[in-house]
Image: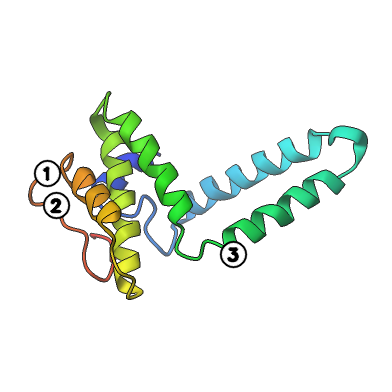
Amino acid sequence: IDFDKFHVLNQRAMPLPLNRSSAAYAIDDLRRIEAILKSQVPPGRSYKAARARTLESIIEIAGDKLGLKALRQSEMYFQRSKKKGGVKCQAKAVALMRHIQSLRLRGENITIELDTIERDAAAVLPDDFVIPEDLSFRA
């Protein structure tokens, strides 16, 4: 599935509820991931380090309730993708705009930095492209 093709149009790649084929596709992916994970042996044959890193990640995520760190990372990837342009770049632009719109929905003040990111993202999309205020997807 070319997820970017749908994301550029602000559409779900897999409409809900999933049809039988899409559900099988998703389960297939989960089984592949499970097989990979079961075949790996952790360094030192212990999961203590992985558990510690997982807890660090949880604390880090909990400390950034607005997801600004992730937004800035996404913006960095977006800037890199602008050199090539195309669907991947536009999909990243849509994701950035959706994130910033979600902040508005939560009543957050949009800083000059975020406004600049949003305008930069909008510049690679068609002039008539709109993210609905309620973040709904197009049918």
The residue singled out by tag 3 in the image is 62
Q: Amino acid at mark 1?
A: Pro
Residue 80 position in % (x across, y down): 34, 29
Of tags 3 and 1, the one toward the viewer is 3
Q: Is residue 99 left or right of residue 22?
A: left
Disc 3: CA contacts within 10 A as few (<14), some (14-19) or many (>=20): few
- Picture layout, residue 92 above or below residue 57: above
Q: How many marks?
A: 3
Q: Is residue 3 left or right of residue 57?
A: left
In contact (CB < 8 Å): disc 1 and disc 2:
yes
State the separation of the CA atoms marked 1 and 2. 5 Å
Q: Is residue 52 visible to us here?
A: yes
In contact (CB < 8 Å): disc 3 and disc 1:
no
In this view of the protein, which residue sits in the foreground, 58 or 29? Answer: 58
Please give the label number shown on residue 129.
2
Residue drawn where x is 51% and y is 53% of the image: 23
Q: Amino acid at mark 2?
A: Phe
Picture quadrant of residue 102: bottom left
Residue drawn where x is 16% and y is 57% of the image: 130
The residue singled out by tag 1 in the image is 126
